[in-house]
Image (cartoon, rainbow, N blue to C red):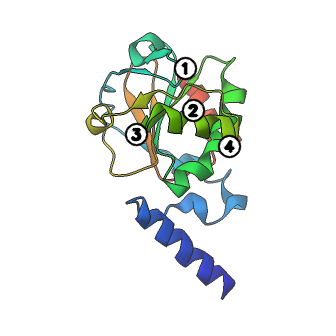
């Protein structure tokens, strides 16, 4: 009965963010074994739409400046419960990856500098958080809702997509990203 209630709540939260429920929410114990299934490969490997966006501190983050290394590009908002839930794991992933030739950016969709800065301070986030305040950048990426995360290869092509919340610090999942450095 309790599992049924939790499953129903997870489905409602996902629907609130316009997403189908995701496998990652179901069973954290099986997350490592299923990491390859958590990132959907995009066989056509489309070119990642470029962006140059400012973060809350005024720094500008450009996807073109990150070319030559794998980049995890997460689209999120503070009002989205699954987005909020995955941010601590994204921070842990950033702490693991930042010195190993992989970038991670969390593109906030449609919110103000004050909202993003307050959220980052509350969760002690220090990875880049560029802001797409007018949503012009996020509309160019192939996504249906928030959170959606893309993995861009060193050549600037989207090779993986993850719609919905993920455990971004999962070792097997990060191995898929690190393998792109070769």
Numbered disc in front, either 2 or 4: 2
In the picture of the structure, the residue carrying the numbered disc 1 is 57
Label annotation for residue 109: 3
Q: CA distance from mark 3 to mark 4?
A: 18 Å
Q: Nearer the viewer, residue 100 or 86?
A: 86
Q: Is residue 178 visible?
A: yes
| Secondary structure under the numbered disc 4 in the rendered image | helix
Residue indicated by mark 4: 88
Distance from disc 2 to disc 4, alpha carbons, whole Å, reads: 15 Å
> How crowded is the residue under tag 2: few (<14 C-alpha within 10 Å), some, or many (20+)?
some
Position of residue 42 relative to residue 33, above or below, is above
- Mark toward the viewer: 3 or 1: 1
Q: Earlier in the sequence, mark 3 or mark 4?
A: 4
Describe the element under mark 1 as helix, strand or loop.
loop
Q: Residue drawn at (68%, 41%), measured in percent from left and top? A: 122
Secondary structure type for disc 2: helix
In the figure, is residue 4 to the left or right of 141? right
Mark 3 or mark 2, which is nearer the start of the sequence?
3
Which quadrant of the figure contains the N terminus? bottom right
Q: Residue furthest bottom?
A: 1
Callouts 2 and 1 close, C-beta under 8 Å: yes
> Going 52% across and 39% down the picture, which residue do you hit?
115
Residue annotated with mark 2: 117
Q: How packed is label 4: few (under 14 Cα within 10 Å), some, or many (20 or more)?
A: some
Where residue 135 sits in the image (x, y, percent)? Answer: 31, 36
Numbered disc in front, either 3 or 4: 3
Q: Are marks 3 and 4 in contact (CB under 8 Å)?
A: no
Give x and y (percent) for residue 176.
Answer: 58, 35
Q: Please report the residue visible at 57 percent of the width from the left and 32 percent of the height from the top.
A: 117
Q: Nearer the viewer, residue 133 or 75?
A: 133
Instruction: First in sequence, mark 3 or 1: give its number.
Output: 1
């Amino acid at each position: 009965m309790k599992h049924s209630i939790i499953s129903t709540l997870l489905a409602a939260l996902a629907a609130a963010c316009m997403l189908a429920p995701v496998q990652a929410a179901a069973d954290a114990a099986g997350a490592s074994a299923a990491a390859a299934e958590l990132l959907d490969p995009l066989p056509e490997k489309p070119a990642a739409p470029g962006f140059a966006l400012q973060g809350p501190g005024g720094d500008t983050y450009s996807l073109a400046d990150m070319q030559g290394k794998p980049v995890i590009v997460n689209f999120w908002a503070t009002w989205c419960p699954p987005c909020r839930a995955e941010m601590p794991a994204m921070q842990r992933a950033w702490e693991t990856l930042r010195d190993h030739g992989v970038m991670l950016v969390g593109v906030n969709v449609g919110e103000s500098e004050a909202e993003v800065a307050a959220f980052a301070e509350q969760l002690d986030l220090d990875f880049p958080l560029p802001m797409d305040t007018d949503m012009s950048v996020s509309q160019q990426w192939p996504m249906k809702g928030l959170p959606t995360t893309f993995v861009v290869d060193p050549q600037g092509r989207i090779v993986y997509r993850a719609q919905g919340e993920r455990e971004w610090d999962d070792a097997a999942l990060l191995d898929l990203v690190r393998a792109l450095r070769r």
